[in-house]
């Protein structure tokens, strides 16, 4: 106990003097480590990556040693082209130039100065003040399909153990609504929660959590993405598990 107390004191002094965040390796539970543990524990063999952008999440999965199938969805054409180039030599990484939602059809996406902030929603006044690069630079017509339609066309009857990752800038619940028929094959999920909405009409995090719970998913971990200067949380990544599929 004395050694642990001394270690905490030393870490605290280093943090204050060097303005770092030194922590004990034995106490760290990062998004990366938790994600790897979920994939292993739930024996995930397929990841559906919705809102893939340039393939950052797919690259993370490969860095973690995930060797299963990845299906990445990115609707903005210029960003999709970068994604497809990244995945071109990976035979188990398939890219789709389409969005997922609650119904099929076409929609207009607002492409932001920083591509990761592009959304079907319009930035809120708060979001515009917070992020200069959320500014809309153009609009683009995109195709939307549903998870169920994708599943029926590509995965049906294969008994997949799926992780659904959603990073859609305010459209995650619509993605889940389009997965009603194939929900039983989704064993884990990752969703971006909005605590302080940066888009108009964005789903509040409590509403999102209630919807996930209603579908049978329990929270496994919450990891901050961004905070205000007063330390209030803006967004967080939430990992969820379907306990009935463990």
Image (cartoon, rainbow, N blue to C red):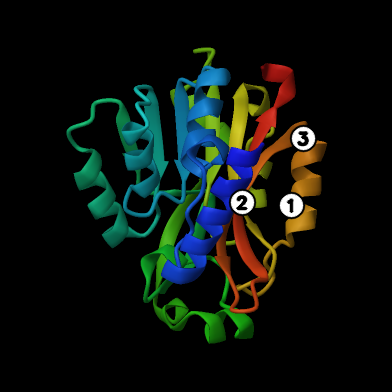
Q: Which of 207 and 195 is in front in this view?
A: 195
Residue 192 appearing in the image: yes
Sequence-first tag of 2 and 3 = 2
Mark 3 Cα shell of 10 Å, populated few (<14), some (14-19), many (≥20)? some
Q: Position of residue 71 (x, y in %)?
A: 40, 35
Q: Where is residue 44 in the image (x, y as percent from the top left)?
A: 50, 21
Is residue 178 rendered to the left or right of residue 137?
Answer: right
Tell me the CA gap for discs 3 and 1: 11 Å
Circles 1 and 2: CB atoms closer than 8 Å? yes
Residue 155 image label: none
Circles 3 and 1: CB atoms closer than 8 Å? no
Q: Which of 156 and 84 is in front in this view?
A: 84
Q: What element carries label 1?
A: helix
Sequence-first tag of 3 and 1 = 1
Q: Residue sitting at 40 percent across and 44 percent down? A: 57
> According to the image, label 1 marks what residue?
208
Mark 2 Cα shell of 10 Å, populated few (<14), some (14-19), many (≥20)? many
Q: Residue sitting at 60 percent across and 75 percent down? A: 228
Q: What element carries label 2?
A: helix
> According to the image, label 2 marks what residue?
172
Tell me the CA gap for discs 2 and 3: 14 Å
> According to the image, label 3 marks what residue?
215
Q: Which of 246 and 28 is in front in this view?
A: 28
Is residue 95 rendered to the left or right of residue 185?
Answer: left
Sequence-first tag of 1 and 2 = 2
């Amino acid at each position: 106990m004395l050694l642990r107390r001394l270690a905490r004191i030393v870490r605290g002094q280093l943090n204050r003097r060097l303005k770092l965040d030194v922590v004990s390796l034995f106490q760290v539970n990062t998004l990366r480590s938790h994600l790897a543990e979920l994939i292993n524990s739930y024996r995930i063999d397929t990841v559906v990556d919705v809102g893939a952008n340039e393939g950052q999440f797919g690259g993370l999965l490969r860095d973690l040693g995930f060797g299963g199938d990845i299906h990445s969805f990115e609707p903005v054409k210029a960003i999709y082209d970068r994604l497809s180039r990244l995945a071109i030599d990976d035979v188990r990484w398939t890219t789709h130039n389409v969005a997922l939602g609650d119904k099929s059809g076409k929609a207009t996406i607002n492409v932001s100065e920083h591509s990761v902030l592009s959304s079907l929603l319009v930035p809120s006044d708060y979001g515009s003040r917070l992020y200069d690069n959320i500014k809309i630079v153009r609009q683009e017509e995109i195709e939307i399909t549903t998870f169920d339609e994708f599943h029926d066309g590509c995965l049906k009857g294969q008994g997949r153990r799926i992780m659904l990752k959603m990073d859609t800038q305010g459209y995650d619940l619509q993605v889940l609504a389009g997965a009603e028929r194939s929900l039983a094959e989704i064993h884990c999920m990752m969703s971006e929660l909005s605590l302080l909405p940066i888009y108009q009409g964005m789903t509040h995090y409590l509403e999102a959590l209630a919807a996930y719970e209603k579908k049978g998913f329990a929270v496994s971990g919450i990891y901050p993405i961004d905070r205000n200067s007063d330390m209030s949380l803006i967004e967080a990544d939430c990992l969820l598990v379907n306990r009935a599929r463990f």
